[in-house]
Amino acid sequence: LSRLVLTDMFLSLTVGAALFAFWKFRESDSRVWSLLFWLSLGLSFLTKGPVGLAVVGLTLLLYKAFRGTAPWLLLLRPEGPLLAALVACPWYILESVRFEGLFSYLFHFQTIDRVATEVHGRGGPIWFYLPVILAGFFPWSPALWVAFRDAFKRREELDLFLGAWILGPLLLFSLSGSKLPTYLLPLYPAFAMLVARALDNPRSTQSVAVSCATGLSVFTVALIAFLSFGLPPEIAPNLNILRGVSFASGIGSVLSLYLCRVSRSTEALAAIGLSFAAVLILLGGGIGRSDAAYSARQVAAVIRERESECIVVEFKDHLHGLPYYLDHRIVQISYPRETQFEQSADYRRYLFDSPEDFLATLKPGQKVLVITRNSDLEQAQAVFRDSEHIRVGHWDLLRLNGRQNDV
């Protein structure tokens, strides 16, 4: 996620800061921690709207329902909510005044509709986040059953708080009509702390080590099986990197299983951590080799070199970053866009419902370059006939010869 332009990382930071400040406030009644709680809450709202308030609010409500103790009334002293409002509200107010309808768009369409409906096309089953947790918190996710078991037995204040941090937001996101793996990111600190608390118990440490070693072994076997069946063209340049990944995870699996067998669980956990750190380092270094296949930079370079005077068109998809590298807007066909905040009616020159609508606007001899995914290539070639096919990484380009306006 650190390689992507997403607000989820900043949201996780502000939500984590708010809940940390709340816990410190619970221990000390300090006005400073109270203000830091509200400041973090305001920053979370500024970062991604009400979702941060929902995560923190559900956590605290469920913690209170679990009979968690805190100086609740002191937390609601007026200066706290006022500070949060001063941080979060000015930008929303200014932009809502500037763009008519923005408030309804942000808080109704992008928030209420996102939760209550599947209007954004990101629905999924109620168990959607179970594999997300398994993969996203790997290699420690196989030990979560141990962590939850121990927390349920102890039921100390911190266990109640961490349980509320996980269960409340997880229920909200699981029932939401819009589901993405990144939504769960603010919960990962709670997962980590629960597993860390399980390591305080020597018996649980052994269970954690065995579970994680088994999980790493399954990962290794699955990766080796994947490599045995051949790689997609975009990933093929990383074959040696992936072999190194399987070797690192394999060494960690064998060593950690052996250490578990001789009851050296602490060393087994260290072996798991070090081997998976090597896995992540190898993957991080190898991602660059695949980046070019998906990057707009490579496509833009081909366009500038070979077709600088043509009309660039995206068909049924959007290659993010291409307008930036070409320094102009791209025509989009059969790719619905939100247009209510366009500053000029000129946008109609760039958005077309169908290829036929676009072709009807072409002048004789105009050069066109169509960009599409391989999954839509056959349909694009059926519409844009007599075109030359160019493959650039993950993307397919069709160069039209200037007669398509007669179609």
Image (cartoon, grey):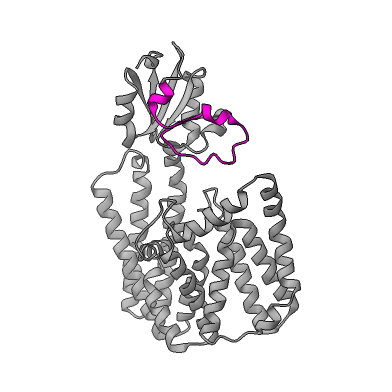
Is residue 114 visible in the rendered structure shown here?
yes
Return the x and y of residue 28 as percentages of the image width and height: 69, 83
Q: Find out whether residue 397 is within the magenta segment.
A: no
| Figure quadrant of the C terminus | top left
Q: Quadrant of residue 256?
A: bottom left
Identify which residue is drawn at 49% across, 39% down. 337
Residue 130 position within the rendered picture, expressed as x and y whole percent measured from the top left: 37, 66
Q: Please tell me which residue is depicted at 47% across the width and 63% down the height of the picture.
A: 184
In the rendered image of this protein, does residue 392 appear above or below residue 338?
Answer: above
Query: Would residue 137 be visible to someone looking at this image?
Result: no
Displayed quadrant of residue 139? bottom left
Range shown magenta: 331-359
Q: Left or right: where does residue 364 sit relative to residue 73?
A: left
The question of residue 334 being in magenta is answered with yes
Q: Taking 388 as reference, is 178 above or below it?
A: below
Q: Residue at x 52, y 37 (%)?
A: 321
Nearer to us in this view, 97 or 254: 97
